[in-house]
């Protein structure tokens, strides 16, 4: 608004608020009064009053405009997703730039189980994608990989060499217990999920897997009780008194004495990693491109994810039910962004937002991928092990899983390990994404995993990507994807 306009507004007698009662007359009436002093004085007073009221109004108007736009700015920055992202302390030192959340993650729609949608992954070809479950959101795409791609991936993996997916014995558990400095009472209390003062078999089983990587069955445990004479009253439960008499690693030591077989581990397979960046075999780059098209995620996110993991199960191989990525608490760091975040935290997970699992061969017998709680109405962790039936045990109880996918050469399945936060980013872990590889009963089984790593903390993900892009500008180097053998091998959350 220019000064000119303001003046002309006054001339046009727009009657600003507050001046409505002033006895204004048309200018032609005012002019004859000019020579009379009384008339001219009152005229002067009227003009001055009018003038002042007008000025005050203009000032108030300016204040109003200024105040309002200030508020708009404030509310705009309040709504900005970047500052909304669990960060009440939005004013932070400029050394860590705040990134405006300008990326929204596409999440495919399942519609309903059995729904088929067409997807375009390669020019001139249409694939069909079938919804297998809504919880977790899980799809199947037959013919995702060509025969050649399957063959090349298996050959490259063999050329590189596969390593045992899980070492026979994991050390360091005793140190961890010592570090935490827990008394037997405290440990007992943690284990006693239903707080009835007794340890049921399933309470011990759940705990033991997290700690030792040795898969215990209820029968194993009874043998251990008998061998250690742990259950003195023979009721199949451990009381606090009975528990106190056991040393911290009594179970593990007993098992080691007996000799642990591969089949007693959480995971019985061999694997290797294949990089998919610049210079990699064309088949590997093509697979990455197809994964980007399938998931409809920004290519940079797929590029910066873990390499392709190729897994081989021999006859008798298995992988008990697990989550590919763990829950995220405020203090949890993601493996891939941890360095950029520049913080130290005791909790770390791989933040695998999506798993794309490829079947590289058709398995003669067994080897299905099982989803024990898919599309359950509710999720109840305790009831996963009941009456000696352990739904997580993929050697014994795959037939009781809600959903099993048969390995068929070239088929891909993919699912989301995390829910959406409702605002286009990664939300909480999806506990229904629990899955495992059933025992291979005939032949061998080859699969590959493509995990897409995204930090649920947008700021950390953005900072990481910025750092990597700076780095690659400096060095024009492809070796920026995390080295999984150092950073993220064996970071599955084993139950
Ligand atoms: C995995 C996995 C399932 C399967 O490798 O993380 O869950 O069917 N594999 O092999
Ligand atoms: Ca109990
Ligand atoms: Fe898995």
Image (cartoon, rainbow, N blue to C red):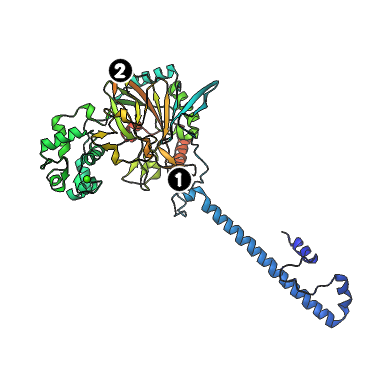
Mark 2 Cα shell of 10 Å, populated few (<14), some (14-19), many (≥20): some
Label 1 – label 2 distance at C-alpha: 46 Å
* Mark 2 CB within 8 Å of ligand 1: no
Q: Label 2, on which residue?
A: 443
**Observer able to see residue 164:** no
Q: Position of residue 405 (x, y in %)?
A: 38, 26
Q: Residue at x 42, y 25 (%)?
A: 412
Q: Position of residue 89 (x, y in %)?
A: 44, 55
Q: Label 1, on which residue?
A: 459
Residue that sits furthest to the right in the current view:
32
Q: Quadrant of the N terminus?
A: bottom right
Of the numbered discs 1 and 2, the one sitting upstream in the chain is: 2
In the figure, is residue 266 to the left or right of 301? left
Q: Position of residue 48 (x, y in %)?
A: 76, 75
- Image marks 1 and 2: residues in contact by CB distance under 8 Å: no
> Label 1's element?
helix
Q: Nearer the viewer, residue 205 or 347?
A: 205
In the image, which disc is placed on residue 444?
none
């Amino acid at each position: 608004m220019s000064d000119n306009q303001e003046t002309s507004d006054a001339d046009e007698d727009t009657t600003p608020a507050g001046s409505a009662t002033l006895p204004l007359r048309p200018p032609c009436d005012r002019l004859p009064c000019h020579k009379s002093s009384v008339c001219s004085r009152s005229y002067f007073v009227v003009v001055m009053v009018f003038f002042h009221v007008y000025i005050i109004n203009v000032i108030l108007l300016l204040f109003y405009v200024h105040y309002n736009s200030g508020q708009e700015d404030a509310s705009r920055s309040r709504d900005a997703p970047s500052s909304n992202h669990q960060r009440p302390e939005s004013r932070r030192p400029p050394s860590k730039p705040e990134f405006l959340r300008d990326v929204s993650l596409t999440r495919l729609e399942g519609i309903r189980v059995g729904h088929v949608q067409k997807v375009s992954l390669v020019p001139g070809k249409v694939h069909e994608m079938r919804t297998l479950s809504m919880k977790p959101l899980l799809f199947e795409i037959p013919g995702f990989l060509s025969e050649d791609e399957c063959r090349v991936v298996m050959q490259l993996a063999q050329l590189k060499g596969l390593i045992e997916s899980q070492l026979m014995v994991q050390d360091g558990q005793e140190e961890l217990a010592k570090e935490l400095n827990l008394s037997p009472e405290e440990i007992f209390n943690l284990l006693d999920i239903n707080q009835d003062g007794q340890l049921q078999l399933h309470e011990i089983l759940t705990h033991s897997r997290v700690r030792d990587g040795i898969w215990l069955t209820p029968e194993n445990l009874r043998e251990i009780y008998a061998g250690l004479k742990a259950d003195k009253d023979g009721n199949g439960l451990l009381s606090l008194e009975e528990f106190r008499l056991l040393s911290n690693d009594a179970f593990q030591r007993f098992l080691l004495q007996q000799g642990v077989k591969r089949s007693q581990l959480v995971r019985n397979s061999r694997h290797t990693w294949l990089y998919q960046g610049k210079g990699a075999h064309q088949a590997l780059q093509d697979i990455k491109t197809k994964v980007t098209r399938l998931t409809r995620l920004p290519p940079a996110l797929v590029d910066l994810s873990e390499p392709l993991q190729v897994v081989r199960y021999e006859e008798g191989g298995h992988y008990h039910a697990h989550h590919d990525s763990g829950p995220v608490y405020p203090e949890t760091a993601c493996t891939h962004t941890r360095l950029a975040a520049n913080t130290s935290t005791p909790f770390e997970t791989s933040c695998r937002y999506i798993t794309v699992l490829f079947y590289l061969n058709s398995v003669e017998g067994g080897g299905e991928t099982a989803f024990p709680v898919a599309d359950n109405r509710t999720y109840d962790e305790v009831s996963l092990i009941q009456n000696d039936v352990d739904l997580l045990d993929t050697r014994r109880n795959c037939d009781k899983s809600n959903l099993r996918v048969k390995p068929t050469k070239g088929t891909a399945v993919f699912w989301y390990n995390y829910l959406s936060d409702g605002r286009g980013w990664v939300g909480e872990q999806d506990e229904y994404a629990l899955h495992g590889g059933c025992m291979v009963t005939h032949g061998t089984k080859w699969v590959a995993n493509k995990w897409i790593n995204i930090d649920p903390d947008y700021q950390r993900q953005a900072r990481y990507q910025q750092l990597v892009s700076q780095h690659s500008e400096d060095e024009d180097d492809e070796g920026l994807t995390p080295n999984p053998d150092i950073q993220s091998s064996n970071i599955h959350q084993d139950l």
